[in-house]
Amino acid sequence: MTSVYKNDNARREVRSWCVNRVADWGIAHVRSEVVTSAGVTAVVTAGPEPTRDGEPGVVLLPGTNMNAALCLPLVEVMARERRVTILDLPGQPGLSAGRRPRFRRMPWYGSWLGEALTQSVPGPAVVVGHSLGGAVALACDSPRIVGRVVLSGAGITRLRVPVPLLAATVPWLLQPSAARSAALLRHMAAPGRGELPGHLSAWMHLVARSCRTSLAPPPLPSGLLEQRRSVPTLVATGRFDPFLPPRALGPAARRRLGAEFRVIKGAGHLLLDEAPAEVSAVVEEFCAGLGG
């Protein structure tokens, strides 16, 4: 096992940043923890209780280097319609346990999610995963999962790293600064977009200073994805996603998962920040289609 944090001070600084941001959120919510075999898992819940038996709640899994504190704008929109539970992934910077295995991470994450769902979600769940969170959603075979929405999700096909994005990533890692963090985010977002929220640049600067970022997982085995066809799945990506462009992710999602595929216009890889209203509408439409 290896820690996402460079040292204890880094862990404390990241935790303080996340605790303060969630505490300052102006929406009614509950922050709690559950204990799993992967360690403590942080849980943030918002939105109305289900109004009828069998109505699924939404469980949101953030991506690499992200957590509940970074997902609040999206959850604020989604929680108007139904209960939303955000789980911080262990081994990623945030409020969950900071350690992750060196090998076989996706089976480990799949087992973790099954445990976390059992303890944090009382009924059926539609799991919405962004980037790494999408791969984790697909790696889990929990019977509580009645649907999956995979947003710019890893695990379906190999991620691409364009040269300009790689050129922005290396200095961000080696010599972190707020300016380099903002530059990296611009390469991940849709071209021509205005400034992204300031907290996002501040967070990425903190991550570069404090954490050992993880690489994207390779595509999940074909046999595993074949098994996931038994549960409805929607895959979506931003029109300008540099890692998972529609021309690559769409055919792979249909071929390997038999999944419906959507393109969210005007967005890149940072779907949760670039298009929260559009993502929320896609998730709500998917849930409604399940009869929930």
Image: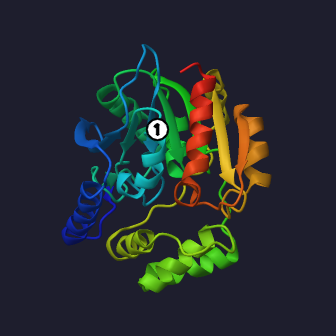
Residue 122 vs 71, above or below: the answer is above
Residue 235 vs 291, above or below: the answer is below
Q: Residue at x 38, y 54 (%)?
A: 67
Residue 261 vs 145, above or below: the answer is below
**Left or right: residue 106 compared with residue 259:** left
Residue 177, how many percent across, how many down?
41, 84
Q: How dense is the environment of label 1, judged by Cα within 10 Å: few (below 14), some, or many (20 and up)? A: some
Residue 254 vs 13, above or below: the answer is above
Using the rendered view, name the quadrant where residue 144 is placed.
Answer: top left
Q: Residue at x 30, y 42 (%)?
A: 43
**Left or right: residue 207 compared with residue 163:** left
Amino acid at the residue labelled 1 = Pro
Residue 69, how many percent across, how many down?
35, 56
Residue 155, how many percent across, how many down?
60, 46
Using the rendered view, name the quadrant where residue 70 is placed.
Answer: bottom left
Numbered disc 1: secondary structure: helix
Task: Work out whether residue 27 or residue 244 is closer to the camera in this orientation and state it.
Answer: 27
Residue 135, how many percent across, how many down?
54, 44
**Left or right: residue 86 compared with residue 74:** left
Q: Mark 1 highlights which residue?
A: 107
Task: Work out whether residue 131 or residue 32 is closer to the camera in this orientation and state it.
Answer: 32
